[in-house]
Amino acid sequence: MTVLITGGLGFIGSHTVVELIEQGEDCLIIDNLSKSSIDVLDKIESIVQKKIPFIKLDLLEMLSIRDVFIKNNISSVIHFAGYKSVGESVKDPLSYYQNNLISTLNLLEVMDEFDVKKLIFSSSATVYGDLHTPPLNEDLALNAPNPYGRTKLMLEQMLKDLSETDSGWKIALMRYFNPIGAHNSGKLGEMPYGIPNNLMPHILKAANGETTKLQVYGGDYDTADGSCIRDFIHVMDLAKGHVQALKFVEAHNGCEAFNLGTGIGYSVLDLIHTFEEVNNVIIPYEIVERREGDIVTSVADVTKANTLLNWSTQFGLKDMCYDAWIWYKATKRLSV
């Protein structure tokens, strides 16, 4: 039996494939390569020392999805594929609604047709919006503040409706906080296309001298050092969370949401200074005006994942910073 991984060559998807293979699972990766590189497949195979089946496929093409299910014995799906830039979604919301919603609808329809009803869905902590005081638990009211987040929220509701209509579905909704870090082999990490959306790629570029200064948005928030606070989680801890979620849905019907974070908040400046300390580098930065839409503090309550998934994080902020820099140096072939 095979686990189908959509978007399996992306940052989180590729690390999860490694963890699944190392846990003895058979995987099939599909990816349209619009935001990822085929080179990632070689890196995954180098780590696990095994060939991984891959199909270039766009989930907007339903007949292509059906062909995958016809030709392969798919037992479950981990669905990472989708657009994920908040800023891009604000500028071009229709592309986000079309890509994220329609592609998932196509996938679900084919899964239903072939009676494959075990699904791990890649969601986001952005579905909580800014209504609540952290730590955020899974029972809070949801209110996504941008088109990207609203696609995740709509899909979560769709999956809940589906599971209530058909009790055969087994679904886990994984709400990520702020994944950073890299695989400790130095072969896999986060290499975004174009201008990065996340903080760590900007830190890496600044540390390597590719940018003059790292911009920190806002230094006057009501926090200890004036910068925003986030729950940073190592990408390999996130990957292990998906493996545990897969075990969970094997044994439980219905639809459950899980936060994946550490439960610890660090400020943007904490992250910068920790990176400098761990890697003995200087990060030139400047405080600039606040960015519209940024939430002051976002930290997970991970009690549910700890309890029901038997999962907890193993890596701290120093590990995240160290592994990210090791990967970046190897990727850029730096001499530092």
Image: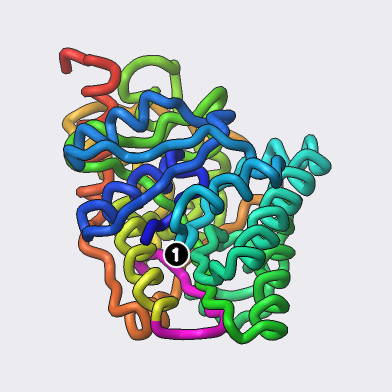
Could you tell me if residue 290 is visible in this image? Answer: no
What is the secondary structure assignment of the residue under circle 1? strand
**Residue 215 vertical placement versus 167 (above, below):** above
Observer-nearest of 69 and 315 = 69
Left or right, residue 159 beside residue 225: right
Please name the residue shown 32% across and 40% down the image. Answer: 52
Residue placed furthest toward the front: 71
Could you tell me if residue 236 is visible in this image? Answer: yes
Left or right, residue 272 beside residue 174: left
Colour pattern of the rendering: rainbow
**Residue 218 vertical placement versus 336 (above, below):** below
**Residue 215 vertical placement versus 146 (above, below):** above
Residue 63 is one of the magenta-drawn residues: no
Left or right, residue 133 beside residue 318: right
User: Residue 51: image x %, image y %?
Assistant: 27, 37
User: Residue 15: image x %, image y %?
Assistant: 33, 46
Magenta part of the protein: which range? 251-262
| Circle 1 residue | 75
Observer-nearest of 197 and 311 = 311
Tally of numbered tags: 1
Please name the residue shown 66% across and 65% down the image. Answer: 113
Circle 1 crowding by C-alpha within 10 Å: few under 14, some 14–19, many from 20: some
User: Residue 173: image x %, image y %?
Assistant: 54, 69
Q: What residue type is labelled 1?
A: Ser
Snapshot quadrant of residue 143: bottom right
Residue 260 is one of the magenta-drawn residues: yes
Please name the residue shown 41% across and 47% down the image. Answer: 28
Please name the residue shown 48% across and 36% down the image. Answer: 55
Left or right, residue 97 beside residue 218: right
